Amino acid sequence: MSKVKTLGQFIIEKQSDFPYAKGELSRLLRDIGIASKIINREVSKAGLADILGEAGETNVQGEQVKKLDLFSNEQMIAALTVGGECCAMASEENEDIIPIDNAQSATARYVVAFDPLDGSSNIDANVSVGTIFSIYRRTSLSGPGNTADFLQRGTDQVAAGYVIYGSSTMLVYTTGKGVNGFTLDPSIGEFCLSHPNMKIPNGGKIYSINEGNYVHFPDGVKKFIKWCQEEDKPSKRPFSSRYIGSAVADIHRNLLYGGIFIYPTTSTSPKGKLRLLYECNPLAFIVEQAGGKATDGFGRILEIELNSLHQRSPLFIGSTEMVERAEEFMSKYSSVELKN
Ligand code: P6P
């Protein structure tokens, strides 16, 4: 009896978790899985760009080679359009929403926001990158979705997940009933359940932040970093500094080992760098469901009011004990105006 449980089998098995579920959410997750497999195929060839042709040129087959983030964006849009289960999409690559105006989608109940290839600037160095997605019920009644369908709090997400294209390709997602991880088995082309019921360690010894921005960090962040670096055996300090520069990879590592990832306000990113809709909210939903915490340094990420598609937020995310320690420093050392 095979012990392999595919993503498809798992989704159908869990479908009973949703009363009145007619399978749309299951099919939506299936569609995202399909796009991820196609993206994975191209990302895994990235190192062959010299042979296959750089982006913007034609390859040996005479085909136009696209930048991988644009390619990934096209695959997500295509899979969700054909799948017919969502009425609109929002993407990091598109200024405005992408309404889907076809017969199937007119009655679709969901909208999907995504970052098709987060960290793509690292691709040429063969660093792990990721796709991040977030699913909401539409608030409009019918027809193609509209921008207002996306302006919801993170607490309103019905599902969220990421795909990390690394030493192996993993899809990690939640529907609010815990977090499960699936590793792609290329020999059968299926995501197989490899990390059931993922839980982030309550404490950790890894802090992940771009210390190159140190001089521009809020005082609370500076004090937290120095606290992490102090010698203190009972609390196992100094902690280790690990920063990949690809949020999905940094946060995935911390999800497995414990730790905190911080992208605070800086001089070049006065509201933070990461986007609330398709980065902070889905990653926060996953980490909270795994028992961790995600805030902007003062308040819960999932409760932040979203007023625009590409709105940015500071992000403190990971093991609860580490996030709460960082919040203590933020409260103690950051000036009052930063709390508004
Ligand atoms: P910096 C990638 O561009 C990204 O959006 C995140 O994945 C990553 O955590 C962050 O930016 C890295 O930004 O300023 O440290 O290079």
Image (tube, rainbow, N blue to C red):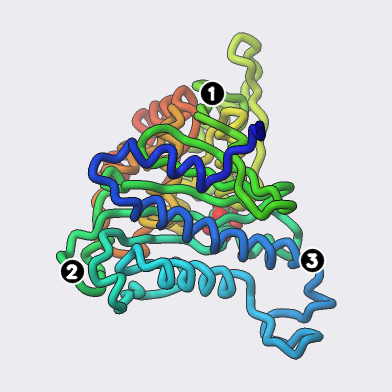
Q: Is 303 left, or right, of 289 in this rendering?
A: left
**Residue drawn 70% across and 47% down?**
168
Task: Classify mark 2: helix, strand or loop.
Answer: loop
Q: Residue 183: where, in percent of width, then height?
A: 64, 44
The amino acid marked with disc number 1 is Pro
In the rendered image, the residue lying farthest to the right is: 51
Q: Is residue 218 visible?
A: no
Most foreground residue, 26 or 125: 26
Q: Is 195 left, or right, of 23 in this rendering?
A: right
Name the residue tied to disc 1: 201
| Cα separation between marks 2 and 1 | 43 Å
Given this view, does label 2 or label 3 mark the residue nearer the observer? 2
Q: Residue 59: where, in percent of width, then height?
A: 77, 84
Which label number is shown at residue 142? 2
Picture quarter containing residue 108? bottom left
In the rendered image, the residue lying farthest to the top is: 234
Answer yes or no: disc 2 within 8 Å of ligand 1: no
Q: Residue 159: where, in percent of width, then height?
A: 37, 47
Q: Is 150 left, or right, of 142 in this rendering?
A: right
Q: Ligand 1: which quarter?
A: bottom right
Given this view, does label 2 or label 1 mark the residue nearer the observer? 2
Looking at the rendered image, the quarter that the C terminus falls into is top left
